[in-house]
Structure formats: C-alpha cells, structure tokens
Image (cartoon, helix red, strand yellow):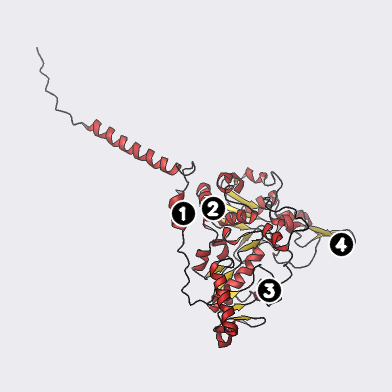
C-alpha cells in the first residue's frame, strides 16, 4: 500500500536572517573595538583628539578694564627662599595665598612664568651642576620649569583671571602704570586686603605691587585656621593641571578601573639626626615604621578589600620596597604607564601632578598624613613640623 506524503510547507528563510543579524553585530563590534584601540592599544583608552577638545578651555581675553596684582617673579621670594627653593606643595600654598588675594580684590593676578624646582624632589636630569661663572638668572632658568607646563592658565582664569609675567600684556600694563605715575602703581607693605579693597587710594590703582613685603608669599596668609576666610581649597591648583597632564591621568585612571590609592611620603620626612648623646631622633617618630609594607598592610586592611588594584605614589626609591603588598593587592605604579607618561614629563613636579590626579580619582585614597579630620592616613604623626625631635619607633612593641 502506497503512502502519500503531505507536501512540506515552504520554510521561511529564518536561518538567513539570523546569520545576517549576527554578521552585522560582529562587524559593529569589531569596528567599536578597533576605534577604542586606535589611540594607544588599550580597550579603555580615550580618543586623544576628542578628549583634548573636551578639555580645552575658552581662551582668557581681557576686557581692557582690568586692575592687576603683582607678587614678584619668583614664588616665596622675598623671604628666606630667594636663594633656595621649596617643594611644589609649599609653593602651591603661596600661589593659593596670592590667588585668593587677587580674587578678594577682584584683580587679575600676574603669575610668575616659571616655577622653581627643588633638586631634592627632582630626578629627571634637567638639573645639573652649575658653572661658577653663571649668572643667577641662568641658574634660575636651569632650576625651574615653565608655569604653563604645570598649570592650565585659561582654566585658572575661569575662577581667578591670571596673566603670565613674560606676556606681552604684562609689559603693556607695566608701561601704562609708569605713565600714570602715582595713579598707576603702588608698592605696598603691611596693608591688609580689606583696606586695599575699600580705600579709594588703593582700589583705583591699575597695579598693586606686593613685592615690598619682606615675607615669603604664604606667610602673608599663614593662619588658615579661619576656614570661612579660605576662598580656594587645597584641591584647587591640583585640579588646574595642564591639559596634557590631565589627559595622561585620565588615560591611566581608565586602565586602572576600580582602584584604591595610597600616597607614601618617605624620603626627606624620615630623616634623623643625632642628639648630643649620639641618640638618633626624628621629627616624625612613627613615620618610617608606618610607611613600611608590613605596617601598611595592617593599616589599610579595614579600608581596602583583598584583590583590589592599589595604586602607589611614593618618593621611596628602593626597588621592591612595596612588593609585600602584592600578597593581598594588585599593585600599580606610574612607572607601569611609562608609554603614556614619559613623552610628557620633564621633571618630577609634572610627574607628581599626574600622580596626584590619579590619587584623587581613586575609590579610596589613603594619605601619608591626615590633613583633614575625614582623611584616611598611614600614620598618626602630625604633618606639621612640631620642632620636637623624638626617638624613632620601629615596632609595635616599642609603643
């Protein structure tokens, strides 16, 4: 008996449609990955041209009605640091002081065009032994870097208008102030900012010159305990880093992903000296101990979970010094990203500015010293110099 098979219904070309969708999705994914990799080979890298465009600030353009505040061409000079040079943080304290005064007086600040570099904090080799016959100006140039290689002037000008003291505009201001005579410029010492603002004798001047003071800049507003009087926070200048430094920091932060960060200050801070009995003493008696890897592990355990990426910024130069931390964390240093950093930096100040941006981008940041009551810190020793030399403590048992 013959069986008659029912004719098969004509199948819809589902498989063809599915293959087509998969192919389109694959091509789109490949295009996306290739575009992300195009900058420097990382899936988490930024497209440099797009990011630079985003970071560009509007160019500061004076209106012609500005009045100016000048504090000198070298930060912290006058004062005891004219022949020497303080570190970046100290100089930033002075800059904030001057910027705050300009802000209060509603004047344009005349920014030094160069930043002094302290050789203690620099290892990039731009400093070298000076010939004895070099002039002080030549020595200054050799031991400094361009201010706009550290900071974005247009970015700062959005909060406090600034011009550089090597700019054409500054020379025009000087020329005009001299022509105006007593109405153009005043060299002031010991006049408080309230009087400068409210007294017509000063407020109408084109240029106020503060270099007559014998004090270094930050000494003029050293008492910062009155928080209501502070107009610019500590974070202001670090956040004003030059655009290329900010781009580098953003690229590194993207590669790090979810990370914690510690800043470990050792170097000059752990130095000791012998008293008249030959006993070693230190201004920060617990710092050397508290910034060693085994003590850091114990200290940060409650703040940083095991397995998290830990970015370390430190002036400790001993190879492998922090390696014991790798037992619990994935360690990262700025040196791991030399392909991003090395083409940019010429000195350690630029490197520290990049590291600082990375530190403040962390999920958890742990500082060496507590600067604020809410800060997490590696040591309980005060940051401020107590001028009290104590016997160092190296173990928990010595407490």
Q: Which residue, given by chain and number where applicable, does mark 1 sit on? A: 52
- Neighbor class of circle 2 (other Cα within 10 Å; few <14, some 14-19, many 20+) is many
Residue 235 appears in view = no
Circle 1 crowding by C-alpha within 10 Å: few under 14, some 14–19, many from 20? some
Q: Which residue is mark 4?
A: 275
Q: Is residue 126 above or below residue 372?
A: above
Q: Which residue is mark 3?
A: 219
Q: Earlier in the sequence, mark 4 or mark 3?
A: 3
Q: Dot 2 corresponds to which residue? A: 249
Q: Looking at the rendered structure, which numbered label has been put on residue 217?
A: none
Label 4, label 3: how far apart the Cα atoms are: 30 Å
Q: Where does the image place residue 335, in percent across and percent down from the top left?
A: 61, 46
**Label 3 secondary element:** helix
Q: Which residue is drawn at the image coordinates 56% and 82% (left, top)?
A: 205
Which numbered disc flags the more N-terminal residue, 1 or 3? Answer: 1
Q: Residue at x 64, y 83 (%)?
A: 191
Q: CA distance from mark 1 to mark 3?
A: 37 Å
Q: Nearer the viewer, residue 252 or 137?
A: 137
Instruction: Name the element at disc 2.
Output: helix
Task: State which quarter of the image contains the C terminus.
Answer: bottom right
Q: Position of residue 117 (x, y in %)?
A: 67, 59
Labels 1 and 2: the sequence-earlier one: 1
- Reading the chain from its start, which is encountered first: label 1 or label 4? 1
Residue 9 location (% of width, % of height): 14, 27
On the image, which quarter does residue 68 sit in?
bottom right
- Please name which of the two marks, 1 or 3, marks the residue nearer to the observer: 1
The secondary structure type at the circle numbered 1 is helix
Q: Pick whichever of labels 3 and 2 is earlier in the sequence.
A: 3
């Amino acid at each position: 008996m013959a069986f008659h098979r029912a004719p098969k219904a004509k199948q819809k070309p589902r498989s063809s449609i599915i293959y087509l969708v998969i192919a389109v999705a694959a091509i789109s994914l490949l295009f996306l990955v290739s575009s992300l990799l195009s900058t420097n080979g990382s899936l988490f890298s930024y497209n440099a041209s797009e990011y630079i465009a985003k970071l560009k600030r509007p160019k500061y353009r004076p209106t012609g009605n500005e009045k100016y505040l000048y504090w000198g061409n070298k930060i912290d000079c006058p004062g005891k640091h004219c022949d020497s040079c303080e570190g970046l943080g100290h100089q930033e304290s002075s800059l904030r002081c001057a910027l705050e005064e300009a802000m209060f007086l509603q004047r344009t600040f005349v920014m030094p065009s160069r930043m002094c570099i302290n050789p203690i904090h620099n290892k990039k080799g731009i400093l070298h032994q000076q010939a004895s016959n070099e002039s002080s100006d030549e020595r200054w140039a050799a031991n400094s870097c361009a201010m706009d290689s550290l900071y974005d002037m247009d970015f700062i000008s959005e909060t406090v208008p600034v011009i550089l003291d090597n700019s054409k505009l500054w020379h025009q201001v000087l020329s005009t102030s001299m022509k105006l005579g007593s109405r153009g410029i005043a060299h002031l010492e010991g006049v408080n900012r309230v009087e400068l603002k409210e007294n017509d004798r000063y407020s109408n001047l084109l240029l106020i010159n503060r270099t007559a003071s014998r004090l270094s800049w930050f000494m003029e507003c050293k008492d910062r305990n009155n928080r209501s009087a502070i107009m610019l926070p500590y974070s202001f200048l670090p956040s004003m880093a030059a655009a290329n430094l900010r781009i580098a920091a953003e690229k590194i932060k993207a590669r790090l992903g979810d990370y914690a960060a510690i800043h470990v200050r050792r170097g000059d801070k752990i130095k000791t000296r012998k008293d008249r009995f030959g006993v070693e003493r230190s201004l920060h008696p617990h710092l050397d101990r508290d910034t060693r890897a085994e003590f850091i592990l114990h200290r940060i355990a409650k703040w940083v979970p095991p397995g998290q990426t830990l970015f370390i910024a430190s002036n400790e130069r001993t190879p492998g010094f922090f390696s014991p931390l790798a037992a619990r964390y994935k360690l990262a240093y700025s040196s791991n990203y030399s392909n991003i950093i090395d083409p940019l930096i010429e000195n350690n100040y630029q490197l520290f500015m990049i590291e600082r941006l990375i530190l403040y981008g962390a999920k958890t940041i742990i500082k060496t010293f507590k600067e604020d009551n809410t800060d997490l810190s590696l040591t309980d020793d005060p940051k401020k110099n107590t001028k009290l030399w104590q016997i160092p403590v190296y173990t928990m048992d010595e407490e």
